Amino acid sequence: MLKAKDILQSNKKERAQKIKAEAKKLTAPTTLGKLITPYKYGFAMRQFTEDYININIELDKNLMRGSVLKKENLEIALKARIEDYLVGAMKQTSAERVSIADMIAKPTNAYEMSGASELAFANRVTRNLSTTMGNLWEKLADISPYAINPDLEFGIKIRGIDLIAKNMQNNSVEFIQLKTTKNTLSGSQSGRANDELLLHPNPVFAAAFDVNQNWTYKNDENIIRICGKEFWARIGMDYDLVFQIVTNTIRQLEDEFVKALAK
């Protein structure tokens, strides 16, 4: 059985090896099909994640500068992770600009087929940002000692699970699928999301930001659905601060897009 202290004392590669080795020992219903591996990974992680999070919480409480969740510390941590993201995102934004001749020669959509260079460029940029930003929210949430991003911390991706977190309000350990907004996931994709979440105890479907949209995701009655401040409060993070820093970041990306558009 995996222990939190053993995992904490291991590097990322060793953590992944230990979890995979433990998962191989486990059995799962054959009816799960392609979901057998995420089921086993989740089961293996449940052996130590609560203790692992509790240790992180205690370490955070004893930091000389105070908890990372204090507003001034959280702002520094958020900006540091976003700055790392911005470097790559801005470079990629400029790289999406291609010539009209290249677009028409090898079009991938109607904009490129038509040689509508500005629309094609905007479409490329927004599609890429939508994908990479989804990963960014997980990295920001991982700042909290109450949350774990399995990929970042253990080198293990659990299909359909972006975070494992201890809910500050009731102390339950939750398995969370995190999207950007309420309408990120279409209704037709709800069944897949439900199947993935229901493999684990205390499943939660979360939207990082509360915008003027209705839910398109139809959750199973056993899956909690939360949005915006309600999500970030679960892991002790100031939603207003996250919102402010993220919107500033998006405006910076827009400025980069406008510069590239003028070239």
Image (tube, helix red, strand yellow):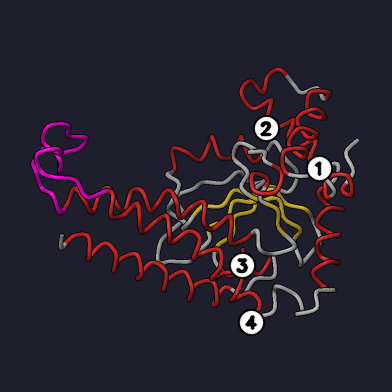
**Mark 1 burial class by Cα count in 10 Å: few <14, some 14-19, many 20+:** some
Tell me the distance, in whole angstroms, between the alpha carbons under discs 4 and 1. 32 Å
Dots 2, 3 in contact, CB < 8 A: no
Amino acid under disc 2: Pro
* Mark closer to the observer (2, 4): 4
Q: Which residue is mark 2?
A: 38
**Of label 1 and label 2, which has the lower sequence position?**
2
**Of label 4 and label 3, which has the lower sequence position?**
4
Q: Looking at the rendering, which quadrant does residue 87 occupy?
A: bottom left
* 66 to 236, vertically: above or below: below
Q: Which residue is mark 4?
A: 72
Going by the image, does 51 lie left or right of 148?
A: right
Residue 197 in the image, given as x and y percentages of width and height: 64, 41
**Mark 3 burial class by Cα count in 10 Å: few <14, some 14-19, many 20+:** some
In the drawing, what numbered circle is on residue 230? Answer: 3
Tell me the distance, in whole angstroms, between the alpha carbons under discs 3 and 1. 24 Å
* Mark closer to the observer (4, 1): 4
Residue 189 in the image, given as x and y percentages of width and height: 47, 38
